[in-house]
Amino acid sequence: MNKLKKVGLTALAASLATVSAHAVDISASGSATLSYTGNSNVGTKGTGNPFAMADTVNFKASGEMDNGFIVTMTMGLDGSKTAAGAAFEDRAIAIDMGDMGTLSFKAQDGSSVTGAMDDKMPSAYEETWFQADAPGNGSGAGNMWTYSNSSMEGVTLEASFTPSGGGQVDSSTDVGITYTGIDGLTIGVAAGTDSGGSADMDNSTKYITYAYDAFTFGVQSNSADSATANADEEFTAYAVSYAVNDDLSISYGYSEIDYEGVSTITDETQEAAAVSVSYSMGSMSLAATRSDVDNEGGNKEHDGAGYAIELGFTF
C-alpha cells in the first residue's frame, strides 16, 4: 500500500514539473471626455443639463496556452456604469485560435453582427441620427458568443449567438461577411434574427465604403422586418469624409428611416443630415457635429437641429 502511494505521488510530482509557465501580459488604458450637447425640438433627445462627462479605464490581460492559442480577458471600468451600480462594462474573454478564428464570450455589452454594422458610414464624429431615432437593426446583449475568422486574405467571416433566458425570450443568431480585398474598398453584408423581444425581428444590412486619396465615400441599406404588424423599418444612408491632414477631418452624411405604419403623424420618414469635424492634438482631441432632423422618430411635429461638442483625452 505504501509503495503504491509513493509511486502515485512521484507520478503526480513528475506531471506537475512538466507544466510550462507562460507569462501573462497585463495592460491598462483609458479615456475621458467632456461634452456639450443641445437641440431644438428634436423629440426628447439632449434635454436637461447640456454638459456631460464620460470616463473609462480599460484593462486587458492575455497569455498563450501550450497549444499556441492566445486567451485575452478585457473589461472596462466606466464612471456611468458605477453610478448605475454596475462598475464594469465590455467584459469579455476571447480565444484566438490562429487560422481557426477567434471565439469570444461577451459577458456584458455584446453586439450581434448586424448590430455592429448598423451604421458604417464614414464620419468625423457622430452619426447623422445621433439625436434622433437610431436604425432598428441588430441587437446587443450580455452573455453572448461571437466568432470571427480572417484567415482568408481580404475576407472576414463573423457570427453571433445569444442564448435564450435572462430576459432573452428566444435565442438570436447573426452571420456576416466583410470583404477588403481591393485597396480602399470595403463591402459588408450581414443578416440574422433578433428573438430577444416579444416578437422576432429579421435584420439585414449591407454597405460599401471606398477610400480614394483623402476622401472616403459610403452608402448603406438596412432592413428590419418585424413579426409585429406595421413595425418594419428601412434605413438608408450616404456619407463622405475628407482628411484635410493627419489631424483634421470633416464629413457630411444623410440618412432616412422609413416606417411601415400608416399614421400621418407618427410614421413619417425620418430624415437626418449632419456635418462633423474632428481635430487631434496628440492625446487630446476636439470634435463637433451639427445635425438637422425632420420627423424625428416618424413624428412630423419633431423637426429641429441638434449639435454636440466633445473634448477628449486618452491615456
Image (cartoon, rainbow, N blue to C red):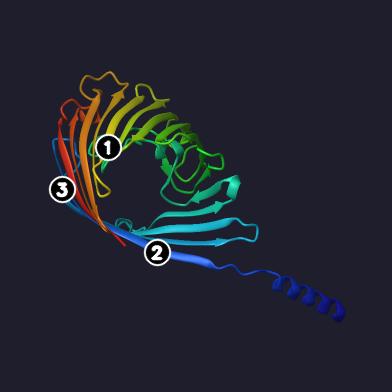
* Labels 1 and 2: the sequence-earlier one: 2
Q: Which residue is mark 1?
A: 241
Tell me if residue 156 can be seen. no
Q: Which residue is mark 3?
A: 48
Q: CA distance from mark 1 to mark 2?
A: 32 Å
Q: CA distance from mark 1 to mark 3?
A: 31 Å
* Label drawn at residue 313: none
Q: Residue furthest left?
A: 40
x, y (%) of residue 265? 20, 23
Quadrant of the drawing holding the C terminus: bottom left
Q: Residue furthest front?
A: 213
Q: CA distance from mark 3 to mark 2?
A: 33 Å
| Labels 3 and 2 touching (C-beta < 8 A) | no
Residue type for callout 3: Gly
For label 1, the crowd category at 10 Å Cα-Cα, with few meaning under 14, some 14 to 19 and many 20 or more, is: many
Mark 3 secondary-structure assignment: loop
Residue lying at 45% horizontally and 34% vertically, measured from the top left: 182
x, y (%) of residue 12? 75, 73
Q: Nearer the viewer, mark 1 or mark 2?
A: 1
Q: Is residue 222 above or below residue 90?
A: above
Q: Which residue is mark 2?
A: 28
